[in-house]
Image: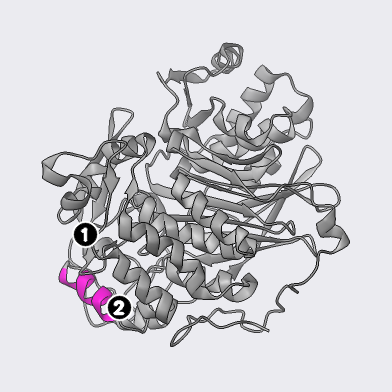
Amino acid sequence: MYRPYVGSGTVPSVTPNAVPRRIGGPTLRQMKAPIAAGVAAAHPATAEAGLQILRAGGTAADAAVAAVLATCVAETIYTGLGGGGFATYYDASTGTATCLDFFVAVPGTDGDIEPDSMVAVDVFFGGVPQVYAIGGASVAVPGVPAGCGELHRRWGRLPWPELVAPAIDLARTGVILPAAQARTLASCAPALAYGEGGAVYAPNGQLMQGGELLFHPGLTTALEGLAAEGPAVFYTGAFSKILVDAVRADGGNLGPVDLATYQVYETPVDHARLAGHRVHARHDLNRTVDTIAALPPDVARLPRPERAVAVATALRDRGRQRVGDTTNVAVVDAAGNACVVTTTLGLGAAVWLPGLGVNMNSMLGEGELLTPDLAPGLRMSSNLCPMVVTDAEDLLTVAVGSAGASRIRTALVDTLLGVLVDGLDLQQAVARPRFHVVGDTVHAEAGYPEAELAALADAGWTINRWPDIDHYFGGVTGVGPGGAAGDPRRGGAGLHL
């Protein structure tokens, strides 16, 4: 039977009567699972939090929840308790995948207040300014606490407080900021170091550098409340009024009804075939699964230069080139189950919850996410695409996701081609140079094969060579052939049992 959160209440799911996975000894399918247990994340401390839970006997979902909560301490440049996300869970006993939507929702269902104007900020990426908007009016209803709770409710084994404990430990001590994440901070500083964020990310007036200690005063209190009362503490409990008051004081219109009625959805899983494997993921704004399905049927047999042209054509993305603060964790447990979770804060609204050290999301200030049909209470669209890949027997081959807004699709497609077609292990596939398509331009990282760039140029593409391997090109984390892999572009790490 489902196990409720430890605490005073729960955040409901829209599928309360779904049949849970049986927890018990490994089945024949699970015994055949080819992937070693491990955790991949964009920060070593995040991966270690997930591994700690696996070692304690937790499931893939347990470990993923612990890792996600750790990201809310160690990776606040990318994500936080005030953000939203998606999770894809693979059940080894049945060979099936399920996707949960706990992305942000449009506020305003209370109907008692109109939002003020947002604050425009310029963020430079690749030397090009991009305009974003932050402030209270950019804040959408958060989903990270509810999503973590729903993952635990459906597929967890360990008590809820044990999953929050690693994040609490990190919040008490602070964490070291990796050099790769310091580079992201430098790009996103106009939003992250704005207002109260300046004391966190630019102490003494100097922007943090890699190797320095990142510490959020009050975040321990927020996580201890989450451990004691469960996710409902942010939606109907002690922190809900703090959240509403902070957002409204800064010009937003998020209200108590918005929080109390927020739900985690189960969203359909799309499928595409690639090199004899099946890719399972949600239908995201970038159309990642559709892009994979649009690759030539013989893509695995094409010479690399010819394949590059075919991939670039499939990836053409109508000019979107946004930054986005996003992170991903991927876990495979000893039974062969997998859980991949991608979460995001946008750039962060610079609306901090007093005494709790939590920055709220800025999703309503992300222009590419604003669709004409948005209305109070509706879920926003997203590029996030956590996925699993199975072989012809529906056995797990890869569990993977990526950060990087409109580059998520590019990063995932290239990584899958590296593993499934080129025979690389996952770490090699994640780390190799890749390209991203914007309009008729191919942006290529340093070291990308010149023969392929020449073929792209001959096919009419404009080539923009970047001088380095750069965090702009996404941040893939996953578990697959060769073990768990973190993306060097984001300071990622992979750990194993």
SS for dot 1 = loop
Vertical order, 253 against 208 (above or below):
below
Query: Any mark on residue 216, and which?
Result: none
Q: Seen in the image, is 485 located left or right of residue 188?
A: right
Describe the element under mark 2 as helix, strand or loop. Answer: loop
- Residue in view at x 38 percent, y 51 percent: 74
Occupied quadrant, residue 122? top left
272 left or right of 232 in image:
right
Under mark 1, the amino acid is Gly
Q: Badge 2 local density, few (<14 within 10 Å), some, or many (20+)?
A: some
Residue wearing tag 1: 135
Q: Is residue 63 left or right of residue 303?
A: left
Seen at 78% across and 37% down, the residue is: 275
Q: Which residues are magenta?
A: 240-249
**Residue lying furthest left:** 204
Q: Is residue 375 left or right of residue 35?
A: left
Name the dominant secondary structure of the magenta segment.
helix
Q: Residues within 10 Å of mark 1 (few under 14, many from 20)?
A: many
Q: The residue under label 2 is which amino acid type? A: Phe
Instruction: Determine the image quadrant of residue 495.
Output: top right
Q: Which residue is mark 2?
A: 239
